[in-house]
Amino acid sequence: MEVTDDGIQVRIPGEKLRSILAALSLSVGRSVSRSELIDELWGEEPPNSAENSLHGHIARLRRVLVAHGGKAALRDVIQTSATGYVLELAEEDIDASRLHQLVARADEASARDPRGAVDLLNEALSLWRGPALIDAGRGMICQVAYTQLEEVRLGAYERLFDLRLRLDHPRAIIPELEQMHARYPLHEHFCEQLITALYRSGRQSDALNTYHRTREYLSQHLGLQPGHELRDTFQDILRQAPHLTRRES
């Protein structure tokens, strides 16, 4: 987790303070109840003093933000609601919210302005500095958000590679696709994109070998065969379907 105010980093000490701020950030502008925050900090066995401890952590977090002494943006940013607490910031001030916004804008732009959509997806992916919320505790809010954000990240890569296959020379993205396929071998769409890029680069045998290795991996680890989309792409490569080599200008 990283907090910045007017370009200056604000250190948030302690996992519990980071967990609170993460939980509030993930629901920016909406109240997060005290019971939800207690569950986030202590799980199913909170101490008897949990509510008082939560108040203490909130007070400390507010002091950390106020003591920073930067612009007014961080002063009084955590408001008390009837049931809990609210982080009073705009959604664009939160990277997780910006990620969703940028991916949605890219989806809207992909048909009419694919190069603009590529720029938006690159901007979205540039927000990542590593696994999301890795230092914000193991509470349910952060764990669910990590899974959801990871799905959005992988989906953004899928969209980006699809667009670049439409626009760019396929050789340019083969190294990136090979990395993603190696890291996520069960993610079939990366394999589909990789074998398409290999085929378009004149490497049909490499494309077929990549497919066969993936099929074997899926069979050994999941007892499954590739999905129909990956199988269809494999068959298209075998028959050298003309649509595989089409490229937009």
Image (cartoon, rainbow, N blue to C red):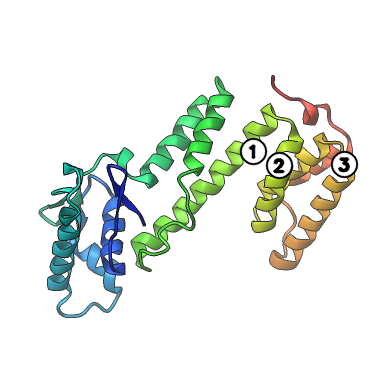
Residue 183, percent from left and from top: 65, 57
Residue 55, percent from left and from top: 13, 66
203 lies left or right of 86: right
* CB within 8 Å, label 2 to label 1: yes
Q: Quadrant of residue 199?
A: top right
Report which residue position mark 2 lands on.
Answer: 193
Q: Quadrant of the N terminus?
A: bottom left
User: How far separated are the C-alphas under marks 2 and 3?
Assistant: 13 Å
Q: Quadrant of residue 60?
A: bottom left
Q: Is residue 7 above or below residue 9?
A: above
Amino acid type of disc 1? Phe
Report which residue position mark 3 lands on.
Answer: 204
Asked which secondary structure carries label 3, the reply is helix
Residue at image position (64%, 35%) is 162
Q: Quadrant of the C terminus?
A: top right
Q: Is residue 216 above or below residue 118?
A: below
Residue at image position (27%, 68%) is 16
**How crowded is the residue under tag 3: few (<14 C-alpha within 10 Å), some, or many (20+)?**
some
User: How far separated are the C-alphas under marks 2 and 1?
Assistant: 7 Å
Among numbered discs 2 and 1, the one appearing first in the sequence: 1
Amino acid type of disc 2? Gln
Front one among 30 and 4: 4
Front one among 53 and 34: 53
Q: Is residue 155 visible?
A: yes
Report which residue position mark 1 lands on.
Answer: 161
* CB within 8 Å, label 1 to label 3: no
